[in-house]
Amino acid sequence: MENFKVYLNVTDENIKSPLKDMIDKNFKLSDKEDDCDLYLTDEHNKKSKSAINMLISSVVKIPEFKGQADIDGFNHYVVYNENDFLVDRVFQAIQRQWILKKGSANSTQDLTGVRALIPMEESEHSSGVKLPIIKTFDVKSSRERNKLAEEMEKFFEQIEPFVGQQNPTFAQYAVEIQEELLMNAIWDANPKHEKSSRTIPIDLDDSEKVRLEWGFNGKDLAISVRDNFGRLNPKIMSKYVKFIFKTGTQESHQLGERDVSAGLGMYMILQRANILSVFISQGKVTDVGIVICISKKKRAKNQSPKALDIIHIDKE
């Protein structure tokens, strides 16, 4: 990764130095904006014509975002509300872009799932349990959702030695988020079932199966749900973001009834999780992941660190 050149154009002095240090440590900090692989900026009107454009946009309070919301032209953006929380998010985002640049045969696998969401260094707990803990499920029927909800509750019991006895709300949030993501992947993402009633059970063909993954690294819980359709349009995704942050622009409300429902679903997820990550490979894969920072100091949900990390590739 040390040969991946990043040009930093950040006006916020509070985050400029820590971002520079992180890039220097893990990547190559470029001093020429026309000689870089990735152009990282917090200015909505600054873009590169030759490099990947990544926008980092600070909000004062989520979800009451009243700032600029011009995210058009950026194929990767991170929206966040806490400076200390940003460096880790940007590292994960740049790493994804490096994997894309590298163009390895397994890049889609490396770009999705829980390993793309949180650090997964190997370690061993004093109890002898090895980290990270990763569990993967291939979901082939909507009937499996109740069983997977029960398994998630058991998973929280499994990680209790690492984080202590947790408020049951965390497990409840994880189950609610998982349910929302699974329903979106089973019904909405699939052109064969998108108009079907969610009250009628659905069985999926092998090519339609949904990949569910959980990951725990000793501090954070990640959940990832991936479908094989890649039908989440980047323009609609941008409108969801503006809807979530209530920018007040006319465009943010130009959503159909179905899209408003999806926007509200993402709003619910962001209220319960710390990170919402959306990876779209157009026509191929949509991977929606979340992170709940279990070990962080407890604060009111509207004050806890939050971030949206959205990347789309292979535009039609």
Image: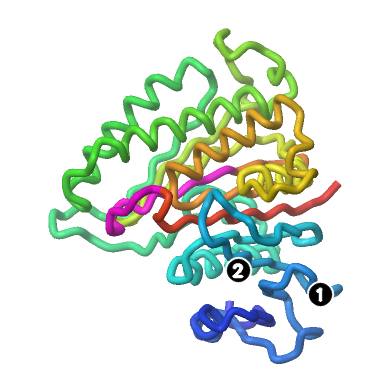
Residue at 41% across, 42% down: 214
Where in the figure is residue 6, as x and y percent of width and height?
A: 66, 80
Quadrant of the snapshot with the N terminus? bottom right
Helix, strand or loop status at disc 1 = loop
Q: Is residue 92 magenta?
A: no
Reply above or below: 60 against 268. below
Q: Seen in the image, is 191 located left or right of residue 292? A: right
Q: In the rendered structure, which amino acid carries the disc numbered 1?
A: Ser
Rendering quarter of residue 19: bottom right
Q: Seen in the image, is 291 located left or right of residue 102? A: left
Residue at 60% across, 43% down: 287
Q: Is residue 293 magenta?
A: yes
Where in the figure is residue 67, as x and y percent of width and height?
A: 65, 60
Reply above or below: 137 against 270. above
Which residue of the protein is positioned furthest toward the left in this rendering? 127
Q: How many marks?
A: 2
Q: Which residue is mark 2?
A: 94
Where in the figure is residue 292, as x and y percent of width and height?
A: 39, 49
Where in the figure is residue 76, as x and y percent of width and height?
A: 69, 60
Q: Which residue is mark 1?
A: 48
Query: Badge 1 local density, few (<14 within 10 Å), some, or many (20+)?
Result: many
What is the span of residues highlighted in magenta in the rendered image? 288-301
Who comes first in sequence, dot 2 or dot 1? 1
Q: In the rendered structure, which amino acid carries the disc numbered 2?
A: Ile
Residue 304 visible within the image = yes
Separation (CA) of disc 2 from disc 1: 16 Å
